Image (cartoon, rainbow, N blue to C red):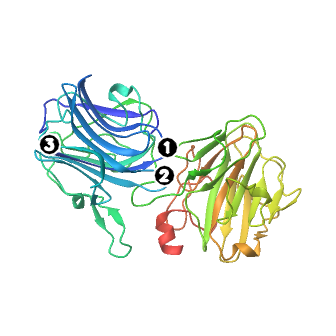
Amino acid sequence: MANTYINRNFSNSGNRTIWTLSMWVKRSKIGAEQMLAHAYQGSNDYTKIRFESDDILTFENYTGGSRNIAKRTNRMFRDTNAFYHFVFVNTPSAQTIYVNGVQETSWRTNTTGNVSTWWNHNISNTMFATVNGGSNYFDGIASHVHFCDGTALAPTVFGETDSTTGEWKIKTAPSFTLGTNGFTILKDGNTITDQSANSNNFSLGGGTITVTKDCPDIVFATLNPLIKTYGTQVFSNGNLTSLNATNEPAWAHTLSSIGVSNGKWYWEIKVSGATPWIWTGIISEAVDVRTQYLYNENTGTFLYGNNGNKYLNGSSASSFFASLATNDIVSVALDLDNNKITFYKNGTATPNATPLDLPANLSSTTVFPATTLVNGASISINFGNAPYAISSGNADGNGYGNFEYAVPSGYYSINTANLAEFG
């Protein structure tokens, strides 16, 4: 959602002292101020709910230039691999923040009281940037945004604890009284048309809202911006596109956000830059990408796009297949049950559709899809939530994912639903 924001001017002010805002968000970028909700009456009168640049979460309100609400968490929110569920509640006696069903109690700043917020006033109520898209765009995914005007609701209205795993999970059809300005958006797909009976529709102020299969109840793997080398590496498209922005030999390594230790898994990598200087494959969890060159390691298998060489257990062999070019797609079918891997180029398995034997030491460890980019190379990776247009559309055997090429029988996209069943 980078550079994207939405807003609505309510026809009338709602209840500015009692309301509940619930949302599920997955961060893509950290270390920058990012707005979740902003209402602005003037330079001295506004409400803002945001991540600060050090990744703490804040709920603040200013009236006449004085900050009369200041809920600033001690803890930081730096997980880019999972959804957070946030519930913000305003009442005449206090303001409350719930995170994944649990009330936040540790604060850097804790000013609270009977306050009429500017949020839910008949002014521009903006989400995912400052009002009118001035700055501080939220970079990530937002889903199931619900607003209740006039009632303080518990987080259990919107989520519940899984009886088997103990994890906090979403209720996809929460039931609550909306109130006059209440709304439900981004519930099914990417619509900002109010999906409640209120018709309190939002407008797209700027940017683009794209459809994503990555949602609170099924989280797909992405690249992991927290595990990388070199500051020249730039992530975008929800951490599914990676660019090594340095036009010189600087090795930029990164891993997927989810690893696997057994089962059969499939993903695709599209060459999105002009240079084919990429390595793609898998690596053991034991390898520290901050200090080691992935293709030299004896705990991984890589394909080198510049000449089609393979790097198996730290050694290379030429003439594996022809070098890659812009828009080529490499598919990977990883069989950890039989310790084999197959690479495909534009849908054709190579060489001669014969799987490669993986290093024996990978059979007892967790492995991660991994990439190395050199000399300005760029790739987009598709674990089932494609960051680029798909011309055909293919799901795995469980109906998950959206791939350019048919998923081999018995192989699955890397997401939390499949991991629960096969992982």
Residue drawn at (76%, 58%) of the image: 302
| Residue that label 3 marks | 113
Nearer to us: label 3 or label 2: 3
Number of other residues with Cα within 10 Å of mark 1, as a class: few under 14, some 14 to 19, many 20 or more: many
Three-letter amino acid code at disc 2?
Answer: Thr
Asked if labels 2 and 3 touch by Cβ distance under 8 angstroms, the answer is no
Q: Quadrant of residue 11?
A: top left
**Most extreme residue toward the right, as rendered?**
318
Question: In the image, is 377 to the left or to the right of 145?
Answer: right
Q: Position of residue 175 (x, y in %)?
A: 19, 57
Q: Position of residue 381 (x, y in %)?
A: 61, 50
- Residue 392 visible here: yes
Three-letter amino acid code at disc 3?
Answer: Gly
Which element type, helix, strand or loop, lies under badge 2? loop
Q: Is residue 119 above or below residue 228?
A: above
Residue drawn at (28%, 65%) of the image: 160
Three-letter amino acid code at disc 1?
Answer: Lys
- Residue 29's tag is 1
Residue drawn at (33%, 48%) of the image: 73
Q: Nearer the viewer, residue 264 or 142?
A: 142
- If you read the primary sequence from the N terminus, does the residue marked by circle 3 or circle 2 appear first? 2
Q: Is residue 407 above or below residue 135?
A: below
Q: Position of residue 360 (x, y in %)?
A: 75, 76
- Residue 80's tag is 2
